[in-house]
Amino acid sequence: MIIEEWLLAALGTVLLVVLVSTAFGLRMSRERSSERQRRLFLEGELQSRTIELEEVRTRMRSLQGLLAICSCCKSIRDTTGNWKQMEDYLEFHFQTAFSHAVCPECMRVEYPGLFESA
């Protein structure tokens, strides 16, 4: 009887160790899987950002040097030889929105009565 109790106690201890080890192993496996998923996500983000930076770099290279700009209307000739309004050209290459205003010098020239009364 004592041997049976001892065997049951030992078996219980072994089962407890196996259960704890299995639970710990599963937890570690889940953590590794989660870390792997996070790493894959971050690698994807890095690749996406790298592509974005390469596109910006390519665009910036195309803007280096001289731009042909009309001295009358200020249109800019693009790499295909087409003339575009300056705002359109800059919006396309820099993803910038424009608002228009009148500088003080042009206000004096274009609207002399309004400028002096303001």
Image: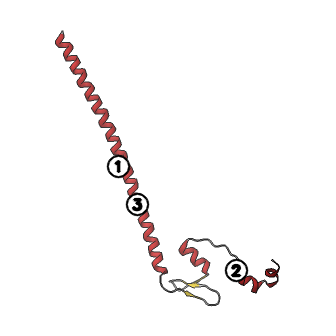
Q: Position of residue 34 (x, y in %)?
A: 37, 45
Q: Nearer the viewer, mark 1 or mark 2?
A: 2
When asked about the image quadrant of residue 48, the answer is: bottom left
Q: Is residue 82 left or right of residue 58?
A: right
Q: Is residue 79 left or right of residue 111?
A: left
Q: Which residue is mark 2?
A: 103
Mark 3 residue element: helix
Q: Is residue 109 left or right of residue 87?
A: right
Quadrant of the rendered image containing residue 58? bottom left
Q: Are marks 1 and 3 in contact (CB under 8 Å)?
A: no
Figure quadrant of the N terminus: top left
Q: Amino acid at mark 2?
A: Cys
Residue 39, how many percent across, how many down? 37, 52
Say which amino acid is labelled 1. Arg
Inter-mark Cα distance, 2 to 3: 43 Å
The type of residue carrying mark 3 is Leu
Q: Residue at x 72, y 84 (%)?
A: 106
> Which label was assigned to residue 46?
3
User: Which label's residue is closer to the chain start, 2 or 3?
Assistant: 3
**Who is closer to the viewer here, 54 or 101?**
101
Residue depicted at x 19% and y 17%: 7
Disc 1 is placed on an element classified as helix
Q: Where residue 23 appears, x then y in whole percent?
A: 32, 33
Q: Which residue is mark 1?
A: 36
